[in-house]
Amino acid sequence: MPKIVDHEQRRRELAAAVWQVIAEHGVDEVSIRTVAAAAGWSAGALRHYLATRGELLAFACEQVIDEVTARIQSLQLPADPVGAVRAILLETMPVDERRHTEASIAFSFLALGLGDRELARVQRRHFSSMHDLCRQMIEGLAARQALAPTPENVTTLARRLHAVVDGLSVHVLAGHLTADEMVAELDAYLSGLTGQACEPAGATEPDIGRTPRLP
């Protein structure tokens, strides 16, 4: 009887292997050979699923987007809307080893996408996903009247929040900030945005607008 192969499970193994290579050696070391070795596969078996380095990287980045989406949707969020926004945003930022690896993969596409159309498509998905998430956060805070008085509209505030989140993440990846310093800066920004201190503690589900989701 022929062996039944769980292709989805094998693709998850490949994603884990790509992340392992990046975490241990950096994005530049991702190749068919290094990922196959990390997964315990032959290079030929790996090419059955993903034939080139570009496909490996694109697959890994899209897996990051899907993983973060799933985590956000399963969060037990604090009742305070500002604390809820804080918790959601931190799922996308390099606060621990796993999220540091995820951010390394995602931000590597800023340069990689310049010379590869497929990688550029994935980079646009990552960027637009984060922008849409930040807009949802601002719209939710506005609906709860949790924003400090400002002449700026929702679009401007969403762009600014996106820039702050991405900028802080890049500073951690570059070694200019620690994860703790990044979180402190995010808290300071959210406090200024809302006029209230962040309250990350708590476990009840808040009503801050639509269910947060990365497209």
Image (cartoon, rainbow, N blue to C red):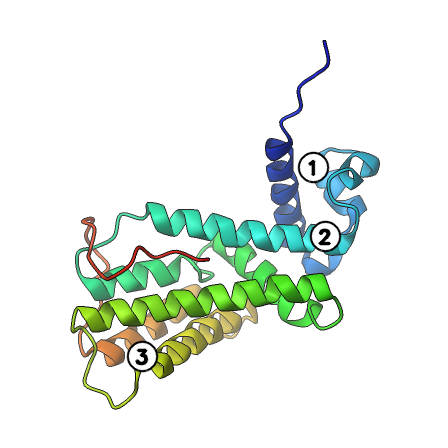
Taking the view exactly as shown, the residue that stands out farthest to the top is: 1
Cα separation between marks 3 and 1:
45 Å
At label 1, counting other C-alpha atoms closer than 10 Å, the crowd grade (few under 14, some 14-19, many 20 or more) is: some
| Residue that label 2 marks | 55
* Quadrant holding the N terminus: top right
Image-based side of 50 in relation to 190, left or right = right
Q: Earlier in the sequence, mark 2 or mark 3?
A: 2
At label 2, counting other C-alpha atoms closer than 10 Å, the crowd grade (few under 14, some 14-19, many 20 or more) is: some
Q: Earlier in the sequence, mark 2 or mark 1?
A: 1
| Mark 2 or 3: the one toward you | 3
**Which of these two is toward me, 20 or 3?**
3
Q: Any mark on residue 100, and which? A: none
At label 3, counting other C-alpha atoms closer than 10 Å, the crowd grade (few under 14, some 14-19, many 20 or more) is: some
Give amino acid for label 3.
Answer: Val
**Percent position (x, y) of residue 117?**
72, 66
| Residue 29 position by quadrant | bottom right
**Percent position (x, y) of residue 158?**
37, 76
| Mark 2 or 1: the one toward you | 2
| Residue that label 3 marks | 154
**Percent position (x, y) of residue 28?**
73, 60
Give amino acid for label 1.
Answer: Ala
Give amino acid for label 2.
Answer: Glu
The residue depicted at 30 percent of the width and 72 percent of the height is: 138
| Residue 84 position by quadrant | bottom left
Rendered position, 45 above or below 145: above
| Residue that label 1 marks | 39
Q: Secondary structure at mark 1?
A: helix
Rendered position, 48 above or below 132: above
**Percent position (x, y) of residue 133?**
39, 64
Q: Secondary structure at mark 2?
A: helix
